[in-house]
Image (cartoon, helix red, strand yellow):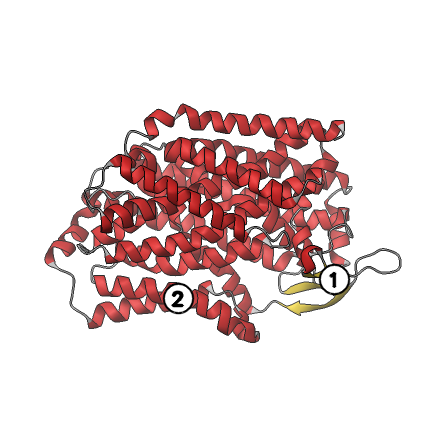
């Protein structure tokens, strides 16, 4: 290993040590009860709540997946995705945060999302809780796998070490940190990681512009590629199928005799496609890792400040990530020739632009994003099984110690499943995340909104909405989307609509909610918390 690599590695190890230290610091407090372990005792301040919500949500997708899409196919998909997410972030904090904070406490002091659904509809058989828990387990296992892919690509790209070994080591670190610290440690470290992520993005963005000779030079290069800078067309790399490691066929961009990347005719990015890409924003209404922060914030009075912090962070980070991908193509036009390798553009620019130790700190932003997300996903998925299935259904008199042990065993299983998902180093982070994002958005988004705003919604409608929305994600992605054309839109949009319609129709044709449920709905906003 060369001196440069040693300094990069040293900086990253120091960062990991700090984050693990946070976990140990909060260990005793987090282990005192399941509410402390999963919700931090509802004591998050506005800065920690906002930054941890965004950091846990964005993951390595922000520093690798989104710049990779911009690098490989240009501005259209990346920009419209960023716009949708920015709008979704603001609306989620505006429409959901305060109401969910109050209603989750009113509804039996619920401290997980499945708990809230069952308590909200007085579901004594815990059917809603169990269905929600199973969906959470499925989609978060996919999410965890995407985080492990990020870790493997990061260390493989930096040091040339074997992808699989590095992915497994990163996965074990995340697992250890999550088991040690619980929700409060996770939220505090996510605040730190959110700071690292946004600083890393801004520094690499400014350095990239300077290295390219200014914005004018970047724009000139982007305009020379058909459709690359357009918001209504998508650049199309001229690719050829190549056999990669493990006999995997990978589409690789072809180069001219002079070594320049070749481009085919750009594709149209029409209104329906733009609308479906903007639908990324709908996913926020169903994201458990974000909704959990709303439930855990110290007071509903802090939410306005959190909303401003979260929105600014989100807008700056998203559009910096997109710009880094576009600038990276002008600086390294022929270096990353597959969609998977394009996701390492942030890593490549960081190592080129910055001194070794500083590059290590900036690249810790990727590891920061990965840890902040994977720990959230593992924690919430384990709570779904331990708290909602084990205690909620099978052993209602389970002790705190028994619940914690089931949670830890669940985390081990999620760890193994995530490693299996991440075993293919040619996986594209952006696509893996988009699938799970659609799953949560369509399964829980319509139900969260209508639970907070519609008095007439009932148990049957809630169950129908979850099942129809969640199942439609799989049906659309696997059976309908392959037809292409208008059917090729992002599955979140049609699945969200199906879930929403199912809730409304089934609620209206079945028995109205009980007087006790409607009374809770009519009075929950008066709660002074």
The picture places residue 294, in percent across and down from the top left corner, at 34, 42
Q: Is residue 414 left or right of residue 292?
A: right
Measuring from the top left, give residue 15's x and y in whole percent.
56, 28
Q: Residue at x 61, y 45 (%)?
A: 164
Quadrant for residue 3, please give it.
top right
Instruction: Count neighbours of disc 1 (C-alpha within 10 A) and say few if under 14, some if 14 to 19, many if 20 or more.
Output: few
Residue 154 appears in the figure: yes
Would you name the residue on which mark 2 appears?
471
User: Is 476 located above or below residue 167 in the figure?
Assistant: below
Q: CA distance from mark 2 to mark 1?
A: 34 Å
The residue most toward the right is 257
Quick check: can you spot residue 320?
no
- Is residue 225 positioned above or below 107 on the image? below
Quarter holding the C terminus is top left
Q: Secondary structure at mark 2?
A: helix
Q: Name the residue: 59% across, 50% down.
A: 65
Q: Nearer the viewer, mark 2 or mark 1?
A: 1
Image side of residue 379 versus residue 86, left or right: left
Number of other residues with Cα within 10 Å of mark 2, as a class: few under 14, some 14 to 19, many 20 or more: some
- Of the two numbered discs 2 and 1 on the same chain, state the one appearing first in sequence: 1
Residue 19: give its label: none
Residue 204 shown left or right of residue 224 in the figure: left
Disc tally is 2
Q: Which type of secondary structure does the marked residue at label 1 adopt?
A: strand
**Residue 362 at x, y = what percent?**
62, 33
Question: On the image, numbered disc 1 is attached to which residue?
Answer: 242
Q: Quadrant of the N terminus?
A: top right
Name the foreground residue: 480 vs 217. 480
Q: Is residue 199 above or below residue 147?
A: above
Can you give x and y, in whole percent of width and height, for residue 321 in the image? Answer: 60, 46
220 or 122, nearer to the observer: 122
Q: Residue at x 56, y 48 (%)?
A: 61
């Amino acid at each position: 290993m060369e001196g440069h690599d040693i300094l990069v590695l040293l900086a990253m190890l120091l960062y990991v040590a700090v984050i693990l230290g946070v976990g140990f610091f909060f260990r005793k407090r987090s282990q005192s009860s399941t509410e402390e372990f999963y919700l931090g005792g509802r004591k998050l301040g506005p800065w920690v709540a906002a930054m941890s919500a965004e950091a846990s949500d964005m993951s390595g997708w922000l520093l690798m997946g989104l710049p990779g899409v911009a690098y490989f196919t240009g501005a259209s998909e990346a920009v419209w995705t960023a716009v949708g997410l920015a709008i979704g972030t603001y609306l989620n904090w505006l429409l959901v945060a305060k109401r969910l904070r109050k209603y989750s406490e009113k509804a039996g002091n619920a401290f997980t999302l499945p708990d809230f659904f069952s308590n909200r509809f007085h579901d004594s058989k815990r059917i809603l809780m169990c269905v929600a828990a199973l969906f959470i387990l499925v989609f978060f296992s996919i999410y965890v796998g995407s985080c492990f892919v990020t870790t493997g690509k990061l260390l493989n790209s930096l040091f040339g070490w074997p992808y699989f070994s590095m992915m497994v080591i990163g996965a074990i670190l995340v697992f250890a940190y999550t088991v040690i610290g619980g929700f409060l440690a996770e939220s505090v470290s996510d605040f730190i990681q959110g700071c690292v992520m946004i600083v890393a993005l801004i520094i690499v963005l400014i350095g990239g512009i300077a290295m390219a000779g200014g914005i004018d030079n970047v724009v000139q290069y982007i305009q020379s590629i058909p459709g690359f800078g357009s918001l209504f067309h998508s650049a199309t790399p001229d690719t050829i199928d190549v056999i990669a490691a493990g006999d995997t066929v990978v589409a690789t961009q072809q180069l001219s005799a002079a070594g320049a990347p070749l481009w085919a005719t750009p594709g149209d990015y029409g209104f329906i496609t733009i609308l479906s890409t903007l639908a990324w924003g709908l996913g926020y209404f169903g994201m458990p890792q974000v909704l959990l922060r709303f439930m855990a914030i110290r007071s509903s009075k802090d939410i306005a400040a959190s909303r401003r912090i979260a929105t600014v962070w989100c807008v700056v980070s998203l559009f910096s990530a997109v710009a880094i991908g576009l600038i990276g193509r002008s600086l390294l036009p022929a270096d990353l020739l597959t969609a998977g390798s394009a996701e390492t553009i942030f890593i490549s620019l960081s190592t080129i632009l910055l001194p070794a130790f500083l590059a290590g700190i900036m690249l810790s932003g990727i590891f920061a994003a990965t840890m902040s997300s994977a720990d959230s996903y593992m924690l919430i998925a384990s709570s779904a099984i331990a708290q909602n299935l084990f205690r909620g259904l099978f052993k209602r008199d389970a002790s705190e110690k028994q619940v914690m042990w089931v949670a830890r065993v669940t985390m081990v299983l999620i760890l193994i499943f995530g490693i299996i998902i991440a075993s293919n180093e040619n996986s594209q982070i952006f696509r893996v995340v988009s699938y799970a994002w659609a799953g949560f958005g369509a399964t829980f988004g319509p139900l969260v909104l209508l639970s907070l705003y519609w008095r007439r919604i009932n148990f049957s409608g809630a169950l129908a909405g979850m099942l129809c929305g969640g199942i439609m994600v799989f049906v659309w992605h696997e059976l309908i989307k392959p037809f292409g054309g208008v059917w090729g839109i992002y599955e979140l949009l049609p699945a969200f609509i199906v879930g929403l319609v199912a809730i409304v129709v089934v609620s209206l044709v079945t028995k109205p909610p009980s007087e006790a449920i409607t009374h809770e709905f009519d009075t929950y906003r008066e709660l002074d918390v």
